[in-house]
Amino acid sequence: MKRGTDHSSLRGLTVVELVIAIGLFAMLMTAVFAVMRGFVDVWDKSESRRARVEEASAVGEMLARDLVQLDGGGRGDLLVQWVPFDTDADGANDSFWPRMSLVRHASPAEMARLQTRSAQKQPGQGLIEVAWVVVPAYKGQTEPDRRSEGLVLRGERLASARDIHGNPTGDGEVSYFDPRFFSRGGEPTPGALAEVTGGVLWFGLEFATQTTSLKDGWRVGTQIPDAGTSWDAWRRDRPDAQIHEWNLPAAGMPKAKDRALLPRRVKLELEFERSKEAKRRTRLSEFLPLGANTMVVDDATRLPTQAGAFVKLDGEWLKLGAPGGRTVSVQRGMRGTRAANHERGARVHFGETYVREVPIGLAQEDWDL
């Protein structure tokens, strides 16, 4: 006779056991999701950093290619100046960005391409003008978070002929060296330049003269061994020092004669902030007046962790002191900017700095740095 199943040895889960099992499963899933979220955050930050580095490297490489081909002869030129902008539309300038115009040698392919677009054919010259311009990404009142951001524009055209004073002459197109190429607000002729990249917080340029000493690193100042922040290859005082002190000529530069004066070396600093990163930045939780040396933020964990890091509020750069909770000590008006009032809720911007040094092989002399 076949023995039947003993149902007395089988029983299901009790309600208590079921609740405990569900709770343990929920705790396990929570831990798994936390690990996955942490992994995604790390991956996202790594991808953002990689994208920033790639973008900065591409811009730096493009600018370096223009600089190493500078023409140092009588038709050459290099003009770098700092230009003011009114980003909040209140009638006062609150930010400064650099503008560079240069003359460089061009390949036959570049010349042929530009000649097809120009009404003025210039066969055999082999020189082109290049403009690098940084302008605010936004001007106005409705999107204050974008006032810190700059757009990098670049253009190239056949080099204009020069008069006996080295000034570009009319050839049917306005030269990049002609002040008329830019509006009174600092904007270039519409459509003349192409956007290279956006999300730029900082675009710093420094120039080593024949007397600049770089043995102990770069130092900007007014002394003979210091580097300059503007450049005028023909020493005609074209950068306006009354607009910004960084337009003062570097100390120790000789008078230009029949050749364009070129820097011995150029240092480029770029700092980018992607829009995804900007959305995660902290904000001011209190109004920051002009003379204050501390700022209060919503979340101090969203600031750079190292003392001495730079952050940007609207058009002003600040240098962070030692971290101390939500109240942070700061040095105002850094990187050539001017201290200003900042409203509660202003976003605190920062990125990662990319540095590139470019030696200029066509400098007039073999300067000892």
Image: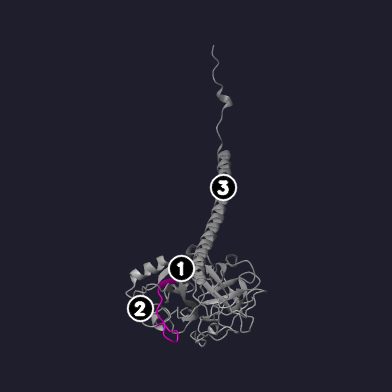
Q: Residue at x 33, y 69 (%)?
A: 116
The magenta span reads 153-168
- Residue 133 appears in view: no
In the drawing, what numbered circle is on residue 173?
Answer: 2
Q: Position of residue 288 (x, y in %)?
A: 55, 78
Element class at badge 3: helix
Q: Position of residue 74 (x, y in %)?
A: 48, 80
Mark 1 is surrounded, within 10 Å at the Cα level, by few (under 14), some (14 to 19) or many (20 or more) other residues, namely: many
- Residue 206 appears in view: yes
In the drawing, what numbered circle is on residue 198?
Answer: 1
Q: Position of residue 26 (x, y in %)?
A: 55, 46
Q: Residue at x 58, y 47 (%)?
A: 27
Q: Position of residue 60 (x, y in %)?
A: 52, 67
Residue type marked 2: Glu
Q: Is residue 293 magenta?
A: no
Q: Which callout, 2 or 3, points to the residue nearer the camera?
A: 2
Element class at badge 1: strand
Residue type marked 3: Val
Image quadrant in which you'd find residue 369: bottom right
Q: Which callout, 2 or 1, points to the residue nearer the camera?
A: 2
C-alpha separation, residue under disc 3 versus residue under disc 1: 37 Å
In this view, the residue in front, 364 or 238, is 364
Pick the quarter of the image with the N terminus: top right
